[in-house]
Amino acid sequence: MIRLCLVIFILAAVPISLLVAYVVWMVKTWRRGRKRLFWCQCAAVVIGFDSLFNLSPVAHWFWEWREMVNFAGQTAEWTGTPFSFNKQVYRYDSARCWNGDGYSLVVLELPPEMARYFSAPPSEFFANYPKKPDYRREWRAVNWHAGPIRTDEKVFTDFVFMDRDAKELKRLEKSFAAIRCSLAKPTTYYAYFHHTISTWDHTPQVCDIDFFVIDPEERLFYLINFNT
């Protein structure tokens, strides 16, 4: 316990010390009459806090752009072909616990050429993708296949759309309705990684899931992560 407190103290002390040192530098700069440098320092503080806490439209755009770049970097692992999304249509993130438990939903728009590509994807798409990342060691991967959802997979979609508090459900209900509509079509493809445990009566219980949906007709890509 003492060691843990010491580690927490050190981790907190480092950024605080850096912040204090920066403020001292700003004060010395002002006293020496170097006003141009001082205002540059102030601008750096404003930009830093804005980027960190996503306070302005510019910061929001920056973080969304970074996220889109990150998604584009993963498309080859998810589908077998690299591409960029047109835009982020919708995003929802619940509060995450210290261990990562929580719910995220991202809706991304496919470029027209990728919608055409996914209207008749190659056999490798179904046989080899998505690639399960190394950090999902204990999870099982289910490759892409066409809708509608199969009866034996209902346990996974029930988990994805499981009941949640009214406030959260109100924010998600429109997207949930769209995903259910997509999954009912034979032109839609879905895949997932899942982590299950056995209950006392040996019934598998879903604990965590990454769920992917591609709807070429609507040009939408859905990405859901739910950890419990």
Image (spheres, helix red, strand yellow):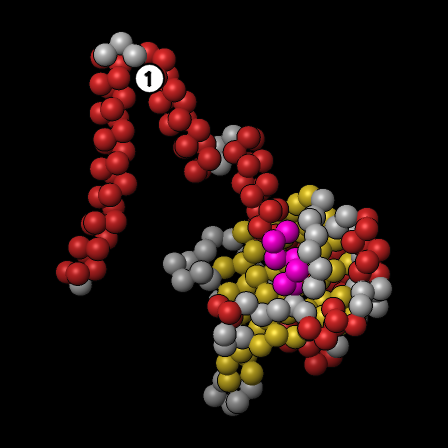
Kindly identify the residue that appears in the image at 48 percent across and 68 percent down.
Answer: 135
Judged by its main secondary structure, the magenta piece is helix
Q: Nearer the viewer, residue 215 or 159?
A: 215
Kindly identify the residue that appears in the image at 65 percent across and 75 percent down.
Answer: 142
Q: Nearer the viewer, residue 94 or 18?
A: 18
Where does the image place residue 81, in percent across and percent down from the top left? 71, 60
> Residue 99 magenta-drawn?
no
Q: Residues within 10 Å of mark 1 (few under 14, many from 20)?
A: some
Q: Residue furthest left?
A: 2
SS at circle 1: helix
Side (left or right) of 144 relative to 206? right
Side (left or right) of 176 relative to 163? right
Where does the image place residue 101, in percent across and percent down from the top left? 46, 62
Would residue 119 be seen by someone viewing this image from the given angle? yes
In the rendered image of this protein, does residue 167 appear above or below residue 42? below
Q: Nearer the viewer, residue 101 or 3?
A: 3
Where does the image place residue 34, in percent across and percent down from the top left? 30, 12
Kindly identify the residue that appears in the image at 20 percent across and 50 percent down.
Answer: 9
Kindly identify the residue that appears in the image at 25 percent across and 24 percent down.
Answer: 25
The magenta stretch spans which residues? 72-78
- At label 1, the amino acid type is Phe
The image quadrant that residue 103 belongs to is bottom right
Q: Residue furthest bottom?
A: 201
The image quadrant that residue 15 belongs to is top left
To which residue does mark 1 refer? 38
The image quadrant that residue 139 belongs to is bottom right
In the rendered image of this protein, does residue 196 appear above or below residue 82? below
